[in-house]
Image: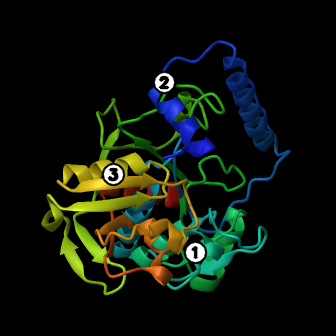
């Protein structure tokens, strides 16, 4: 399969540890630009917007999927169970909504307008969701229209225009920081020392360093796109099937299926790929399995042999009480 340019770069960042010295100045220029930008916010040359409700950022340091969205959902569900009225905001990647106006998202929203992740957030969290590149505007919409008293931001660690009370970084435990360089030479959006200033470092499936919190992404039940039938993933063990994924790290999804014993022919697409019926026209009748993020874009042309796999975040028991205590301290202390 021919790789996209973005996929070629990601493979180089995460698989090739050696970088020619000719390219390293590009990463240094990127880091310098980051420092100037952050300094401008500190001096007030660029405005930071403080919302009337506390803000929890769930972000990452690297390009590619790390598990932010499942953790965002888990945090929102926990806060809801604790009596809060959480709302979730996101940029709306992959959508075409107006850059300046926030858009409320419900379970039936068009992913072509608001983005695929936003629709998953709305369907899974039972919380109000809004998207906008201007994340403070999205947060204000949820506070004013839904009475939300805490905002959880899916991604946005580098969106310094939004003031935050708590920062959580999610790391892919298998890939970590790749070759260790910042963009465009490596996958890092910010240098690793940024971890020193965040409140929680959550590692998705990997070895832990001191102070890091373990998380696993669990998916064991398939859902049919047409009928809604649910089937244990284990029931497909040994079955030849096809799997597609248009997410930040499709390899993790394919590995999950392989670990469950499925014999899958796999096909990766670019993150937020706009699927068409032709992308799924394999004409062999084999079960076709996809991620939940991809499924929200494929329902209109789904076939009875199409399935998706919902993913849930499982985090160390101590994480949520610690998060709640910190939230109370930061907002009332």
Residue at x 44% of width, y 78% of height: 123
Q: Is residue 274 visible?
A: yes
Residue at x 75% of width, y 25% of height: 29
Q: Distance from label 3 to label 2 (Cα)?
A: 21 Å
Q: Residues within 10 Å of mark 3 (few under 14, many from 20)?
A: many
Residue 145 lies, with reference to residue 47, above or below; the image says below
Number of numbered discs overlaid on the protein picture: 3
- Mark 3 and mark 2 lie on one chain; the one further toward the N terminus is 2
Tag in front: 2 or 1? 2
Residue 28 lies, with reference to residue 328, above or below; the image says above
Tell me residue 22's x, y (percent): 69, 14
Please tell me in which quadrant of the rendered image residue 324 appears. bottom left
Which residue was labeled with disc 3?
Answer: 254
Residue 173 lies, with reference to residue 192, above or below; the image says below
Q: Are marks 3 and 2 in contact (CB under 8 Å)?
A: no
Q: Is residue 317 left or right of residue 74?
A: left
Report the residue that reaches farthest toward the right: 45
Tell me residue 136's x, y (percent): 69, 64
Residue at x 43% of width, y 41% of height: 171
- Mark 3 and mark 1 lie on one chain; the one further toward the N terminus is 1
Which residue was labeled with disc 1?
Answer: 111
Secondary structure, mark 3, is helix
- Mark 2 and mark 1 lie on one chain; the one further toward the N terminus is 2
Residue 180 lies, with reference to residue 293, above or below; the image says above
Q: Distance from label 2 to label 1 (Cα)?
A: 34 Å
Tell me residue 318's x, y (percent): 27, 51
Secondary structure, mark 2, is loop
Which residue was labeled with disc 2?
Answer: 16
Secondary structure, mark 1, is helix
């Amino acid at each position: 399969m021919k790789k996209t340019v973005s996929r070629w770069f990601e493979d180089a960042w995460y698989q090739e540890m050696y970088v020619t010295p000719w390219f390293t100045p590009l990463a240094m220029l990127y880091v310098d630009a980051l420092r100037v930008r952050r300094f401008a916010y500190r001096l007030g040359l660029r405005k930071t917007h403080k919302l009337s409700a506390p803000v929890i950022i769930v972000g990452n340091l690297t390009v590619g999927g790390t598990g932010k969205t499942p953790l965002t959902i888990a945090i929102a569900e926990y806060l809801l169970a604790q009596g809060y009225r959480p709302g979730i905001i996101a940029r709306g990647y992959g959508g075409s909504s107006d850059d300046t106006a926030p858009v409320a998202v419900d379970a039936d929203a068009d992913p072509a307008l608001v983005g695929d992740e936003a629709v998953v957030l709305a369907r899974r969290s039972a919380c109000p969701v809004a998207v906008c590149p201007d994340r403070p505007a999205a947060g204000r919409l949820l506070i004013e229209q839904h009475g939300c008293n805490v905002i959880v931001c899916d991604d946005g660690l580098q969106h310094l225009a939004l003031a935050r009370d708590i920062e959580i970084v999610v790391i892919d435990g298998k890939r970590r920081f790749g070759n260790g360089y910042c963009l465009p030479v490596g996958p890092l959006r910010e240098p690793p020392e940024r971890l020193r200033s965040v409140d929680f470092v959550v590692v998705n499936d990997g070895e832990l360093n001191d102070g890091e919190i373990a998380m696993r992404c669990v998916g064991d039940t398939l859902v049919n796109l047409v009928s809604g039938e649910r089937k244990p993933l284990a029931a497909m063990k040994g079955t030849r099937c096809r799997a597609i994924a248009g997410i930040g790290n499709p390899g993790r999804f394919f590995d999950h299926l392989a670990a469950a014993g499925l014999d899958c022919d796999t096909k990766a697409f670019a993150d937020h790929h706009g699927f068409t019926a032709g992308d799924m026209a394999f004409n062999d009748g084999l079960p076709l399995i996809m991620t939940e993020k991809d499924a929200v874009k494929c329902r209109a042309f789904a076939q009875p042999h199409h399935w998706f796999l919902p993913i849930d975040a499982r985090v160390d028991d101590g994480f949520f009480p610690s998060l709640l205590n910190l939230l109370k301290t930061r907002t009332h202390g």
